[in-house]
Image (cartoon, rainbow, N blue to C red):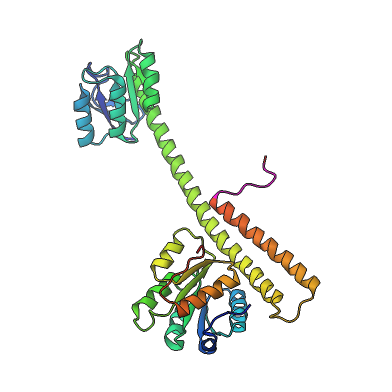
């Protein structure tokens, strides 16, 4: 499954930060994203996620909500406090229930919200949209 | 139980119990007596009580109006109607409107004490039951959230690695292997649908009668 985009030449340099405490999820996402030309870096908790945002300056972050050392909302809160980082699109990918979490995530500035397991095509489309059409926001039921 | 503050709303005289009645088990009843619904409601708003005794034949309100208004103002307080011997119909009606019990006037102070203590105890038991139920509900909700998270992560892994294999990202896949992987993914999808429906409370098993 490849992303069909006119911007394909830009994918080579697109860096995605995957934040999830589940090693298998990270592995699966990395294979899928790398197969689509993205560079993938990882963080396993809220602290390492914040550090990676500052030091690695990713182009996009895929963020789990249930994390050690502060949840995904804490990461988004920290992100939004830094002008330089606040423009990084965030796609929430979580095992948590929709109720409350989806609206809260979208209000915190998420570009899209998906509940696990996510359809690969939908996720890749959301990544593409968030990177190249950052003003439009997606929800998993869009 | 200690001191119990009782509001008596009755146009007649107070029950034949001295002020501060001690029933022998350590409970003392302190009565505040008001002869009209208007005065009773007023004092109910101003002071704190443990129980309300309400006569159903007040000069300024019908029985149903008295019960409805006192019940609204008294919240969860035990509410006991005072009725005369020929008021059985009124008592039944009052029970439907929200009184906790009724007492037939003239049955003696021991019987009234017993009725009041019974109503208080029943309220306390109901409150304990309500708290226990709330605790169970909260625990269940917490466990459900945890279960949802765990199952979704496991399903995500099955889905991710299954689709990676079908897409050939872990090497070539034979047609037979592809068929099996598709079966696996379809069933993972079924689990997800069942989980979603169960959490939303909309799940109905196919064989459900």
Q: Nearer the viewer, residue B56 or A94?
A: A94
Examine the rendering and report whether any part of residue B75 can be seen.
Answer: yes
Image quarter in which the N terminus of chain B is found: top left
- Indicate whether residue A31 is drawn in magenta: no
Q: Is residue B182 above or below residue B24?
A: below
Image quarter in which the C terminus of chain B is found: top right
Q: Position of residue B142 (x, y in %)?
A: 51, 56
Q: Nearer the viewer, residue B208 or B176?
A: B176
**Relative horizontal placement of residue B72, taking residue A70 as reference (left or right):** left
Examine the rendering and report whether any part of residue A45 can be seen.
Answer: no
- Residue sitting at x 38%, y 20%: B93
Q: Position of residue A35 (x, y in %)?
A: 62, 83
Identity of the residue furthest to the front in this view: A6
Q: Give the tally of numbered discs.
A: 0
Q: Which secondary structure type mostly characterizes the magenta part of the structure? A: loop
Using the rendered view, name the quadrant where residue B162 is placed. bottom right
Q: Position of residue A79 (x, y in %)?
A: 39, 78
- Residue sitting at x 44%, y 83%: A53
Q: Nearer the viewer, residue B58 or B167?
A: B167
Q: Is residue B3 above or below residue B180?
A: above
**Relative horizontal placement of residue A70, taking residue A115 as reference (left or right):** left
- Residue sitting at x 30%, y 20%: B63
Magenta stretch, residue numbers:
B201-208
Q: Position of residue B37 (x, y in %)?
A: 22, 24
Q: Nearer the viewer, residue B165 or B56?
A: B165
């Amino acid at each position: 499954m490849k992303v069909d985009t006119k911007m394909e030449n830009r994918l080579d340099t697109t860096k995605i930060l995957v934040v999830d405490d589940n090693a298998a999820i990270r592995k699966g996402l990395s294979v899928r994203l790398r197969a689509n030309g993205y560079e993938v870096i990882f963080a396993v908790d809220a602290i390492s996620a914040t550090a990676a945002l500052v030091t690695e300056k990713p182009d996009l972050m895929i963020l789990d909500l249930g994390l050690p050392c502060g949840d995904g909302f804490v990461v988004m809160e920290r992100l939004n406090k830094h002008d330089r980082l606040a423009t990084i699109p965030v796609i929430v990918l979580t095992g948590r229930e929709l109720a409350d979490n989806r609206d809260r995530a979208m209000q915190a500035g998420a570009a899209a919200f998906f509940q696990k397991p996510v359809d690969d095509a939908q996720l890749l489309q959301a990544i593409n949209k968030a990177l190249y059409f950052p003003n439009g926001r997606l929800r998993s039921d869009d | 139980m200690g001191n119990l503050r009782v509001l008596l709303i009755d146009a007649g005289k107070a029950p034949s119990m001295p002020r501060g009645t001690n029933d022998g088990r350590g409970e003392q009843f302190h009565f505040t007596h008001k002869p009209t619904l208007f005065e009773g409601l007023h004092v109910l708003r101003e002071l704190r009580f443990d129980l309300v005794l309400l006569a159903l034949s007040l000069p300024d309100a019908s029985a149903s109006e008295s019960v409805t208004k006192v019940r609204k103002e008294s919240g969860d307080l035990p509410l006991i109607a005072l009725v005369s011997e020929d008021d059985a119909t009124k008592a039944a009606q009052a029970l439907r409107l929200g009184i906790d019990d009724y007492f037939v006037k003239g049955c003696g102070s021991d019987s009234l004490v017993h009725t009041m203590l019974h109503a208080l105890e029943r309220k306390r038991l109901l409150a304990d039951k309500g708290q226990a139920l709330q605790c169970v509900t909260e625990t269940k909700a917490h466990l459900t959230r945890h279960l949802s998270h765990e199952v979704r992560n496991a399903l995500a892994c099955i889905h991710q690695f299954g689709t990676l294999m079908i897409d050939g990202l872990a090497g070539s896949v034979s047609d037979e292997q592809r068929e099996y992987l598709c079966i696996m993914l379809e069933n993972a999808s079924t689990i997800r649908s069942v989980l979603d429906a169960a959490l939303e409370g909309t799940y109905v098993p196919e064989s459900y009668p």
